[in-house]
Image (spheres, helix red, strand yellow):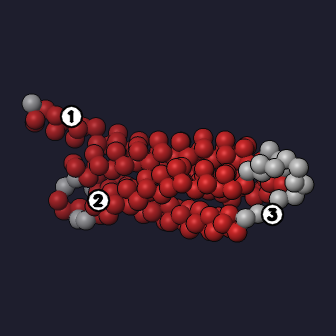
Amino acid sequence: MSQFTSNHIQAKKPMWQTVAAVSLGFWLSSCLLLDLVIMPTMYGAGMMGEPGFVSAGYSIFSTFNRIELLCAALVLTGLLVTVKMQSPVSGNWGRWAVLAAVMLLGIVCVDTYGLTPQMSALGMQLNLFDAAAEVPVAMDRMHESYWVLEVIKVLGGGMVLYWFSRQQQMVAE
């Protein structure tokens, strides 16, 4: 029975590599689209000064963070299956890629359960009679944390994508 299961997983390895690589590509491109196109456009249009922007921003990022969690789980699962079935001559790249995927999942968890709710709470204007509310200093620190995590996420994701392409080349040879 163990042999059957091992052979069955071996037959599915390319599928898992493809699922993980496509999920990671979608995830990283979506992050870059959100961070480099959508948010700057909203900022430039003055939408961030609108009273309902905080709740709209929370809805956007909360939904996007859940999609990121799904993508991170698919990437990690695909990597674990691939590494489990890889040949011993492929070196330590698999371990480093799994470590990077766990780090990516950790970053998404910090974004989902830490930064997004905290940033939304700080930005929420609870006194309707205040005409203009200043941006809290803590919000700037959270934005800095967010951008540092995004850079780490893109670099780690790039490393994992490189590992996938390297594995595909090794399989083709």
Q: Judging from the image, what secondary structure is the residue with disc 3 in?
A: loop
x and y percentages locating residue 2 in the rendered image? 10, 35
The answer to whether marks 2 and 3 mark residues whose Cβ atoms lie closer than 8 Å is: no
Q: Is residue 72 left or right of residue 1?
A: right
x and y percentages locating residue 49 in the rendered image? 84, 54
Q: Label 1 sits on what residue type?
A: His
Q: Label 3 sits on what residue type?
A: Glu
Figure quadrant of the N terminus: top left
Q: Nearer the viewer, mark 2 or mark 3?
A: 3
Rendered view: 167 above or below 60: below
x and y percentages locating residue 173 in the rendered image? 27, 56
Gap in Å between the C-alphas at discs 3 and 1? 59 Å
Q: Which mark is residue 94?
A: 2
Q: Nearer the viewer, mark 1 or mark 2?
A: 2
Q: Which mark is residue 8?
A: 1
Q: Earlier in the sequence, mark 2 or mark 3?
A: 2
Q: Judging from the image, what secondary structure is the residue with disc 2 in?
A: helix
Picture quadrant where residue 46 is located: bottom right
Q: Earlier in the sequence, mark 1 or mark 2?
A: 1
Q: Label 2 sits on what residue type?
A: Gly
Residue at the image point whose x is 19% and y is 55% from the top:
87
Gap in Å between the C-alphas at discs 1 and 2? 20 Å
Q: Is residue 31 left or right of residue 72?
A: right
Residue at the image point whose x is 70% and y is 47% from the top:
57
The answer to whether marks 3 and 1 mark residues whose Cβ atoms lie closer than 8 Å is: no
Q: Is residue 136 left or right of residue 44?
A: left
x and y percentages locating residue 7 in the rendered image? 17, 37
Q: Which mark is residue 134?
A: 3
How many residues crowd around disc 3 within 10 Å: few (fewer than 14), some, or many (20 or more)?
Answer: few
Q: Judging from the image, what secondary structure is the residue with disc 1 in?
A: helix
Residue at the image point whose x is 75% and y is 58% from the top:
40
